[in-house]
């Protein structure tokens, strides 16, 4: 049975869902991905940051949730200002310690990915992980990230994908569609949220299509790489 909301209901549905699972979100991520998710985030950050940057630099993590990207961004560019933005306050509250860990160089800012609360050309690097699947207007969010990126800046989007190898795909589907909702019910205490996860992933554009959407949103030099035996796609683009 589908738990997916209609597009007009999606923002409120998604906001309520993440508010409900915020406290156990990090624990569930580590459990479901066998601890691989932080490595994927580190890989993503490495695609958009440079140790050789000079002057005042800014990075933005869109749909930051509990802010897992923030300490990684800070580690990669210690002098940069690192901002995480999300429209779900309980998620950012659950991740308070991560913004504290960035030595006064970071902040959470409440905001909607489809209407980011920042001026044009503000950021050198943008990251977004497992967020784009959840926005009601994907093109709007891709355009917004482009708008707030400085010319020459880079964006990386980490999102779930479906493995291509038929055998791996079969195993992944079994795990994602059957076992993850069960773990979500038994451990996460919210079966619906972890049923929404595979169902929303199924609706998300495949990697090649996402490349086309990124180009249509104004991004150039768009490319992607698959990680986790194809279970995750990392798209990188430049403005
Ligand atoms: C699966 S979590 C990802 C969190 C984090 N980026 C990570 O890597 O774990 C998705 C996040 O997207 C946020 N989100 C969904 N739609 C949003 C929107 N329109 N504007 C801002 N945040 C949004 C949710 O509140 C949630 O925190």
Image (cartoon, grey):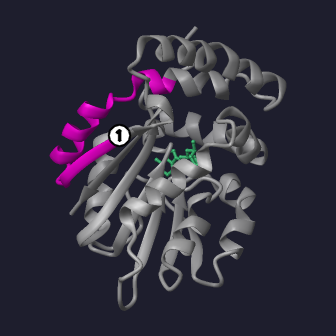
Seen as rendered, the residue at the extreme bottom is 55
Q: Is residue 194 magenta?
A: no
- Write down the residue under mark 1: 137
Whether 217 is drawn above or below 175: the answer is below
Segment colored magenta: 200-225
Instruction: For mark 1, give the secondary structure.
Output: loop
Residue 220: image quadrant is: bottom left
> What residue is shown at x 56% (from left), y 60% (from top)?
69
Using residue 234 as the reference point, say whether residue 101 is left or right of it. right
Q: Is residue 219 magenta?
A: yes
> What residue is shown at x 25% (from left), y 46% (from top)?
223
Residue 5 appears in view: no
Whether 101 is drawn above or below 199: the answer is below
- Quarter of the image with the C terminus is bottom left
Q: Position of residue 108 (x, y in %)?
A: 59, 68
Q: Position of residue 1 (x, y in %)?
A: 58, 8
Whether 174 is drawn above or below 62: the answer is above
- Quick one: 200 or 4, which is closer to the camera? 200
Crowd class of label 1 (few under 14; some 14 to 19; many from 20; radius 10 Å): some
> What residue is shown at x 66% (from left), y 71% (from top)?
99
Q: Position of residue 129 (x, y in %)?
A: 49, 48
Q: Position of residue 6 (x, y in %)?
A: 45, 24
Using residue 4 as the reference point, say whether residue 181 is left or right of it. right
Using residue 54 as the reference point, say whether residue 160 is left or right of it. right
């Amino acid at each position: 049975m589908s738990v997916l909301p209609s597009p007009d209901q999606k923002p409120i549905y998604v906001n309520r869902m993440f508010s409900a699972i915020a406290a156990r979100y990090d624990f569930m991520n580590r459990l479901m991905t066998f601890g691989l998710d932080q490595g994927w985030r580190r890989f993503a950050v490495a695609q958009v940051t440079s140790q050789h940057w000079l002057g005042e630099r800014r990075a933005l993590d869109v749909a930051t949730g509990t802010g897992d990207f923030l300490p990684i961004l800070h580690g990669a560019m210690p002098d940069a200002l690192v901002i995480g933005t999300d429209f779900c306050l309980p998620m950012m509250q659950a991740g308070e310690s991560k913004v504290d860990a960035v030595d006064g160089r970071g902040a959470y800012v409440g905001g909607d990915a489809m209407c980011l609360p920042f001026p044009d050309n503000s950021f050198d690097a943008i990251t977004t992980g497992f967020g784009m699947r959840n926005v009601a207007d994907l093109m709007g969010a891709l355009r917004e990230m482009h708008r707030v990126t400085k010319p020459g800046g880079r964006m990386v989007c980490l999102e779930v994908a479906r493995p291509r190898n038929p055998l791996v795909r079969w195993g992944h589907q079994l795990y994602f569609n059957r076992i993850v909702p069960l773990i979500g019910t038994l451990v996460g205490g919210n079966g619906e949220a972890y049923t929404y996860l595979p169902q929303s992933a199924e609706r998300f554009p495949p990697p090649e299509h996402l490349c086309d959407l990124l180009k249509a949103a104004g991004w150039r030099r768009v490319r992607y790489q698959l990680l986790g035996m194809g279970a995750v796609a990392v798209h990188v683009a430049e403005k």
